[in-house]
Amino acid sequence: MAKKWVYLFAEGDASMRSLLGGKGAGVAEMTRAGLPVPPGFTITTEACNEYYAVGRTFPEGLWDQVLTALKAVEETTGKRFGSPEDPLLVSVRSGARESMPGMMDTVLNLGLNTETLRGVVRATGNERFAYDSLRRFIQMFSKIVLDVEAEAFEHELQAAKDRYGARLDTDLTAEQMKEVAESYLRLVERTAGRPFPTDPLDQLRLAIEAVFRSWNNGRAIAYRNFHRIPHDLGTGVNVQTMAFGNMGSDSGTGVAFTRDPNTGERVLFGEYLINAQGEDVVAGIRTPQPIAAMRRDLPEVFDQFVAIAEQMERHYRDMQDLEFTVERGRLYMLQTRSGKRSAMAAVRIAVEMADEGLIDRAEAVRRVEPAHIEALLHRQIDPAARLQVVARGLNASPGAATGKAVFDSDRAEVIAKTGERVLLVRQETNPDDVHGMIVAQGVLTSRGGATSHAAVVARQIGKPCVAGCEGIKVNLEARLFTAGETVVREGDLVTINGTTGEVILGEVPLIEPSMSGDLRRLLSWADEVRRLQVWANADYPRDAEKARENGAQGIGLCRTEHMFFEAERLPVVRRMILAATEAEREAALAELLPIQRKDFQGIFRAMAGCPVVIRLIDPPLHEFLPHRDDLLVDVAEARARGTPDAAKEALLRTVTAMHEANPMLGLRGCRLGILFPGIVRMQVRAILEAAADIAAEGHVVYPEIMIPLVGHVNELRVTREELEAEANRVQEERGRLTYKFGTMIEVPRAALTAAEIAEYAEFFSFGTNDLTQTTFAISRDDAEGKFLLQYVERKVLPVNPFQALDRAGVGKLMRMAVEDGRRARPDLEVGICGEHGGEPSSVEFCHQIGLNYVSCSPYRVPIARLAAAQAALAPAVRDR
């Protein structure tokens, strides 16, 4: 018996989202709730996967089940598919488990041909509507199934409007629309090399296949890669009876959200068009009206829609994105799904729904994505800035962005890869523009509304967007746009304010936002449930202050070498390195001691009451000296002038003597401290004297001293013995101090011998940047520019391991180190201080293996706080 591949809407429900896709589960649930849903059926996501598994052919039994379901829909509607009397027309739409708006394909009005067209005319008495539906069907079907460019059809339509003096397509008469449809058919035969298919069953089969194929089109793959959606989910296919919004002034179509997807305000938000089909709204073909205007035009329908919207939000306990059509005064619901929203809206909706009792606080924490927090930290335009506003459009996605105007998504991608900031400017975007939107700083369109493709996608990926800016005229061929007398050419700098809808000439100063009250409340709820502490990486007091402002509970990495590079200190550091005798070196170190002590005082004061992990000097000493190649040039030029520079020649000899073929694996970290112990002794003294000074001010101080690049336990033993002696001398002078010694686990051997190392380390901190480099044998600086990104694009690696932790390799070493280290020292404190400490999936893994804290950039602390809470709320441990 063949597997069940097809479900009537009445057979499904919301719990079947994985099988039916989000759209299929949504219409099934609305059908069960008794809402006015045009009947239809869903082909499962499993059928899509099987289609690919058996070589892009329908799986056994699928077509027979489609025909059986089609018969059931015919019985429900009283219409017959392909009948010349009162024909059944259907839409064929995609619908994956995870919402991917606009990424896959849809066909409307399927089933039309010469015979059924006459039946539509007889049944409706509206010849213009029939030909309008036919030309739409020809265009959509030909683009999706026959690969005919949509622009070719737009040219035909525009030619007809120009010929008859029509401003909008709705101004064309029935006879004129018939001419357009006939020109479309000629275009298809000319371009595709075959007549347009006329058998409705052939049309249906080809459309279903096209939707299956669209699961793996370029834009869908790019979207899934960006949002880390698995590629093996497949898409459902929804075949649904058509409801027609293009039948006159008592018909229309629209998209609405139960709350404002930009701000989160509890108000019905959306747009609709009279005498139109759904594609007119989402594609920005015509500029729609606000949903509130429907109260004036169709008051009874509006009241019914408001009641349904409220019902759906209560039912799903989330803001809903609703699609609807009104046919001759009758409302039909086509879709409901959780609405995509801006970061600002996501936080506000979660907090207010918790206050309203729709969800609890834990669910509110789950609802907001870490990426939303990151997007909330978008820059805004400085209110004091003088702006040359040249146009205003719809504030489609919040935040401000500046970039060079680019009018083509492919060019935007190329230019962005060179490091240039680009601003994508289009008449309207479509799914083929997603890759350009992803790399752009922001998006500006001259057409479309707040629910257009540009607006929806920009909000989802956290990019500022100004849409429907009718005050600009975009000339794609000339690569420019005009705003009145102003001409902006490709490469000119433009700023957009997605919060206000302003388009501004040139670059303007931007400022970082502060946390809203809603965000502070949400993060406080997150703090109540997370187990992981969140610390920050901070090298200066100002960084520590920002970290604490953002909720950091400690400093997980303070890099002392960064302090050495400051201009007034570098000469002293160089004298220390170049010292000919131990006495000269000690004199230079004595000069550095009060400088380092003052640095640490500032950080301890800023983080009073919190632990502060300070890493002793890590990089090789030659990094503090002039570059060898520059010295070679200076020395050679001086000799050529006949004025040799003895000091530079001596410096060159020293730098050459220190030169290493692979300095990152050379004399650095603890190795440097073992050979030149005076440096790290000075640092430990500076740390503990600073701690004593701040304690004397009445603050509680918790210094933790980290010894880097340990690969063998004896390195740690020798270094700690040397430094404990110095610490004891400080305590004899200043009194008893509380401190810890620990190490950074950043080479595989340290992880493999963690039990031995834990005998001499009171804490571990995973330096996952170097641990990833040494585990993969990859130099990050070289690899990312040469092959690593290609590895990710070509699926050699699932993700960039420097962005998200490699759980199978690096993660296995980490887990082993945690378990072995705590067996040797049960109270071992373990954290992470690499860049992974602020990446959500890496934070989740750190929670799973029992780390005490994650440490990240001060600006990513709020993200890590939320990610840590979501890891604690996750139903089960999973290693990915």
Image: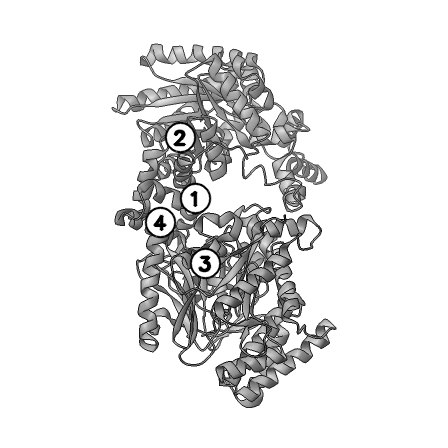
Please name the residue shown 58% across and 27% down the image.
620
Label 3 packing within 10 angstroms: few (<14), some (14-19), many (20+): many
Label 1 vs 4, first from the N-terminus: 4
Tell me whether the residue at label 1 lies in contact with that at label 4, contact meaning CB atoms closer than 8 angstroms: no
Looking at the image, residue 859 lies above or below residue 650: below
Residue 551 position, x and y percent, is 34, 37
Q: In this rendering, which labeled residue sits more in front, label 2 or label 3?
A: 3
Residue lying furthest right: 193
Residue 74 position, x and y percent, is 53, 67
Looking at the image, residue 275 lies above or below residue 344: below
Label 4 packing within 10 angstroms: few (<14), some (14-19), many (20+): many
Q: Quadrant of the C terminus?
A: top right
Tell me whether the residue at label 3 lies in contact with that at label 1, contact meaning CB atoms closer than 8 angstroms: no
Mark 3: which secondary structure? helix
Label 2 vs 4, first from the N-terminus: 4
Callout 3, which amino acid?
Val
Q: Which of 251 and 761 is in front in this view?
A: 251
Which residue is labeled 3 in the image?
27
Q: Distance between the residues labelled 3 and 1?
A: 29 Å
Q: Nearer the viewer, residue 819 or 242?
A: 242
Label 3 vs 1, first from the N-terminus: 3
Callout 4, which amino acid?
Val
Which residue is labeled 4 in the image?
347
Residue 732 position, x and y percent, is 35, 9
Callout 2, which amino acid?
Leu
Which residue is labeled 1 in the image?
370
Which residue is labeled 2 in the image?
532
Horizontal side of 418 relative to 75 (left or right) equals: right
Q: How far apart are marks 1 and 2 (CA)?
A: 16 Å
Horizontal side of 872 relative to 410 (left or right) equals: left
Mark 4: which secondary structure? helix
